[in-house]
Image (spheres, grey):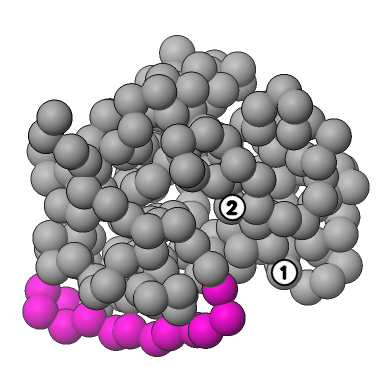
Amino acid sequence: MSVLSNKLMQEGYLKNDLIIDAFANVSRVEFVPSEMELQADIDIPLPIGHGQTISQPKTVAIMLEFLDPRPGQKILDIGSGSGWTTALLSFIVGENGKVIALERVKDLCDMGRKNTDKMNFVKKGIAEFYNLSGEKGNEARAPYDRILVSASSRKVPEELKKQLNIGGKMVIPINNRIHYIERKKEDDFYEEEYSGFAFVPLIKKSSA
């Protein structure tokens, strides 16, 4: 058990055994720049380049607890950055699951793929990385059991809601509030929101 996962458990942010195991086995230090390694176990966001950050561990824990990922699921991870959330989700879904990671910044997409494959998740075919912006998701690989969005948007993109399975769940920041969305039926969505968070914005990929 890492110092970080122990701290998050003691503070009540980590509760689900699957997520606790993922935090304990997927070390954040593998996903931060080398000059940030000594700060990897501190509960703060850290810069990873290109104006982006690796999210605060507490925030990731809260979002994953809402998301409730399970073994064997197909999960869309939007704004995958340096790959930490993708690796955490890959650990949870296991070899019968799939995590589709989208990152609009090519250098970060490449970094995330390399970092995540330190645990062989790419080689095993569990994690797939795409250099795409996330506002329209990835319809070609839909539907998804879960969708995690790690960058803030102004509203919930309708395209993402349509890519959820019936019974599927999405966690997405909207104007720095975490929104939990569950697709009950074809056109029936349950939604809750929680305040007190800060995220980098979800930005469309430039065509240049």
Q: Main secondary structure of the magenta part?
A: strand
Q: Nearer the viewer, residue 187 or 118?
A: 118
x 12%, y 45%: residue:
139
| Horizontal side of residue 134 vs 140, given as left or right | right
Q: Would residue 94 be seen by someone viewing this image from the given angle?
A: no
- Which kind of residue does numbered mark 1 sit on? Tyr
At which x and y percent is residue 71? 49, 45
Q: Earlier in the sequence, mark 1 or mark 2?
A: 1
Secondary structure beneath disc 1?
A: loop
Secondary structure beneath disc 2?
A: loop
| Horizontal side of residue 56 vs 93, given as left or right | right
| Residue position for label 2 | 55
Give the quarter of the figure containing the N terminus: top right
- Which kind of residue does numbered mark 2 sit on? Ser
Q: Would residue 73 be seen by someone viewing this image from the given angle?
A: yes
At which x and y percent is residue 129? 34, 28
Q: How many marks?
A: 2
Residue extent of the magenta highlight: 185-197
| Residue position for label 1 | 13
Q: Locate residue 191: give its quadrant.
A: bottom left
Work out whether 167 lies above or below 79.
below
